[in-house]
Image (cartoon, rainbow, N blue to C red):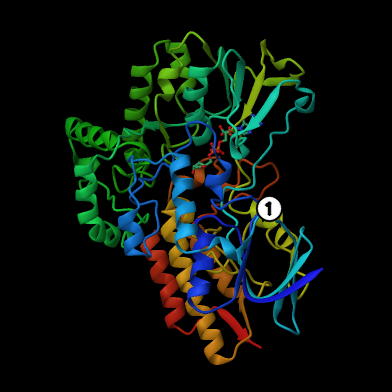
Amino acid sequence: MTRFDVDVVVVGAGFAGLYSAYKARTEGWSVVGIEAAPEVGGTWFWNRYPGARCDVESLDYSYSFDEELQREWRWSERYATQPEILSYIKHVADRFDLRRHFRFETRVTQARFDDDASRWVVRTDAGQEYRARFLLLATGSLSAPKVPDIAGFEDFAGEVYMTSSWPQTDPDVSGKRVGVIGTGSSGIQVIPVLAAQAEHLTVFQRSPNFSVPAFNRELDDEEWEQALAAYPERRRTSWAGGAGSPHTSHPGDPLTMTDEERREVLEEFWQRGGVLFGKTFANQTIDPRINEFARQFAEERIREIVQDPAVADDLVPTDHPIGTKRICTDSGYFETFNRDDVTLVNLRKDPIDTITPWGIKTDQGSHELDVLVLATGFDAMTGALTRIDIEGPRGHRIADAWSGGPLTYLGMAIPGFPNMFSLSGAGSPSVLANMVLTGEQQVNWLVDLIHHCDEHGHTQVEARLDAAEAWGSHVDEVASKTLFVGANSWYMGANVEGKARGFMPYLGGFATYGALCDEARDEGYAGFVLGS
Ligand code: NA7
């Protein structure tokens, strides 16, 4: 076993992990990153299925910490494709010489806290042991894929692909009968592309989702120049905003508008594209009456597009208020169901009985398949952490500590685990905000915390249980005032059998969260036990 002493171990080389390594090095700390993939990119390395795109605009979904980087990288489209985002992340890694800090194709097998030495002892499957003052888990919110537990799955004789770990060489599905299970954001993106390639596509839908066209477009030179000129203001607004992006809701009260006025506003926000429709009115995910205006509008769009009324019926979501599951952003999704070579199977009416060697048998039919694509989601927000063998000094393990639901202080620190912090995790706005800016904000805050410890001679910093409980109550309270808690979403842990139910992300807003973190710092980190 090769042993190394470092200041910081970072797990994960996605947006947050790379920034962690960059900041640690800038502060003069020794840092080692551990990454299971052979390359940087995190989510954007793995989710390389055809059609994969970010549903946040490229201008916002990029680092803000370096003005030159921001100006030199030229995004080609309003919503970047997965390959372009991955190229960007690789560019950042090269530009700041970050790859040398990372051990790729390496997994953390175990992390134990040595209380006497105040060090995390982190072991990897490459036979290394790192003793680190601080452990940063930049393991992602949507990185622990969920394989559905469907009888007969192992027997399927055809090709199986998961959107969350798509092969590096894109499989050729032309002339093949393809089945897709899952109609969340990933399914909705991959389905139109596979439909265009396959001989026949069968979509197995358990729950329909709301999806709004991206209205994607190339960013021409004129638009790019204008965007560059406006970038400082755009970033300022994003940092001060509720979701880390410059977009705000319509200022009017839809309850006092005429029908026509309301429709005009809804149409305007629809045309903005994708998840931005979810922001049309300020209280859209709080007041059911306002939600219903938006829901009705979205339903009409589905029925306008889909020619067969029975298929449209199956595609209209009825099980959740619009926006309480992430609104999907599509390019021709509903249009796909007008194709003769595409079949929709509504699993609510016709559930899967078993997967056989030749395809999928449902209660009412048999669907022969050469290729099966799983777009079945993730054990979101907690899965990446509970799957690592981490033990605190008093024998705490995350999987046990979180059996009743994740408990964090400010979404970053976990009682029982000193000197360890999770990025973009439960209790933080991450998945409801701009993940890139959330990563920057959290890492900057943690750098201040480490400096504070060093300046005051503290070798250990651990979240107080009462502070974490108070934060958890605040997270719950904010969520309970919204319609989000009424949806069986992955935000609620509802997509994983046996997982504790509770709203995991922080809904209080990105800027508010940042302000609360800063307040905790300015009050001398009273939510932590600082010791040696
Ligand atoms: P999602 O949004 O969790 O979608 C997963 C889909 O897979 C969803 O439609 C599920 O239906 C379906 N699913 C899961 N298990 C099964 C089984 N056993 N049978 C049938 N259907 C199943 O994951 P995505 O990857 O699309 O998106 C995740 C996030 O990434 C997204 O929100 C964006 O933020 C980016 P269900 O709804 O559970 O009935």
The quadrant in which the C terminus is found is bottom right
Splitting the image into four quadrants, where does ligand 1 fall? top right
Q: Is residue 238 above or below residue 75?
A: below
Residue 199 in the image: state x and y as whole percent: 56, 12
| Mark 1 crowdedness (10 Å alpha carbons): few <14, some 14-19, many ≥20 | few
Q: Is residue 290 above or below residue 104?
A: above
Residue furthest top in the image: 340
Q: Can residue 507 be seen from the camera position used here?
A: no
Residue 15 in the image: state x and y as whole percent: 49, 56
Residue 150 in the image: state x and y as whole percent: 73, 28
Residue 70 in the image: state x and y as whole percent: 33, 57
User: Total of numbered circles in the picture?
Assistant: 1
Horizontally, is 521 left or right of 198 in the view?
A: left
Identify the residue at image location x=71%, y=56%: 107
Q: Look at the numbered disc 1 and say if its residue's Cβ is closer than 8 Å to ligand 1.
A: no
Of the pair 406 and 17, the residue shown nearer to us: 17
Identify the residue at image location x=40%, y=24%: 332
The quadrant in which the N terminus is found is bottom right
Secondary structure under tag 1 reads loop
Question: Where does label 1 land, which residue?
Answer: 105
Residue furthest bottom in the image: 456
- Kind of residue at badge 1: Glu
Q: Is residue 188 above or below residue 32?
A: above
Of the pair 479 and 94, the residue shown nearer to us: 94
